[in-house]
Image (cartoon, rainbow, N blue to C red):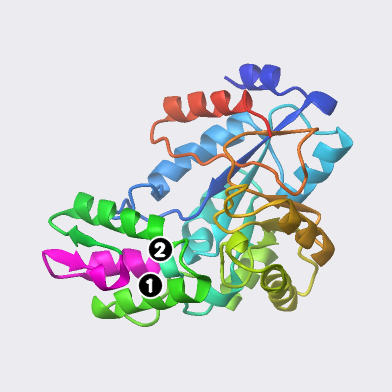
Amino acid sequence: MKPLFRLLSPAGPSAKLSIFIFHRVLPVADPLLPFEPSAEQFDWIARFIARTFNVMPLGEAARRLQTGTLPSAAAAVTFDDGYADNLLVAWPILKRYGIPATFFIATAFLEGGRMWNDDVIEAFRFAQTEELDLDAFGLGRHPLGDAAERVRGYEAVLGRLKYFEHRRRSEVAREIAVRCAVPATSELMMTHQQLRTLHGEGAEIGGHTRTHPILENLDDAAAQREIIAGKRELEELLGEPVRVFAYPNGVPGRDCSARHGEMARQAGFTAAVTTRQACANGASDIFQLPRFTPWDRTPLRFALRSLATLARTA
């Protein structure tokens, strides 16, 4: 398999860069989080990546993409948001296979916080009624008969709620959680010390704003404040510059645009990543690098999707 990837992504100026994006790695499979790999699944994913690709931290990969010095089958592995299981579950597996990784942190949720989307997901988990009535928020009614219905329900809610006005989005998500008796604090996200530990063991840390807004929904001054605040908080925690950035949600043209790339550049970042499903090449905008989301749950399908992604560049 590796020779085919090397053929499609040769070394040097014609190289392509596959950037994998993850959010969580669960200790065991969770029926309410079917798109998040378990430790068992992530083990074979990591093994495949290690055997197939030449993996490096994103900052290094971006520099070498610009200078035309990438190796064949080049890749970077990234995680978004700052979940504690990144350190506790994913990182030991990554170390087992010698895979460097980059972790993008939304700083406002460290130390016991919970992101707005997890407020909603946990509400659907905790709800004890047969139906969750969210008509008061314009978010419909959702049956809760089994795990599959709960997943469909929160996906429908998240798809609409993510584009609410930023402050209102957080307020509604928290109110939904309160109605369903979700605990006010959480251990989902890393503590400051856990983040320092991850960084101290060699992980690259990147910015992901402070409160994870859809940047396109903010005015430019507010978007710039979010980008800068997240960067500064990370640098204060880690004691060194943070050079790479990931746009929250990250769909180009809908969630972020070239002007946000310019904001990231002015803030001192050297590269930024989106969630466009493609591979990067030497012609790619270094502040709009695409990433690949590995939804597949079998090694063969994962390999085939990775190959197919090499045919798409941005």
Q: Secondary structure at mark 2?
A: helix
The image shows residue 73, relative to residue 28, as above or below, that is above
Q: Viewed as shown, does residue 273 lie left or right of 22?
A: right
- How many tags in the picture? 2
The image shows residue 64, relative to residue 206, as above or below, that is above
Q: Position of residue 164 (x, y in %)?
A: 46, 66
Q: Position of residue 292 (x, y in %)?
A: 56, 39
Check contact, mark 2 vs mark 1: CB within 8 A: yes
The picture quadrant where one finds residue 15 is: top right
Quadrant into which the N terminus falls: top right
- Residue at the limit of the structure toward the right, as seen here: 67
User: What residue would you read off at disc 1?
Assistant: 173
Whether the magenta-drawn stretch holds residue 129 is answered as yes
Residue at the spot x=52%, y=71% of the render?
A: 166
User: What residue would you read off at disc 2?
Assistant: 161
Q: Secondary structure at mark 1?
A: helix
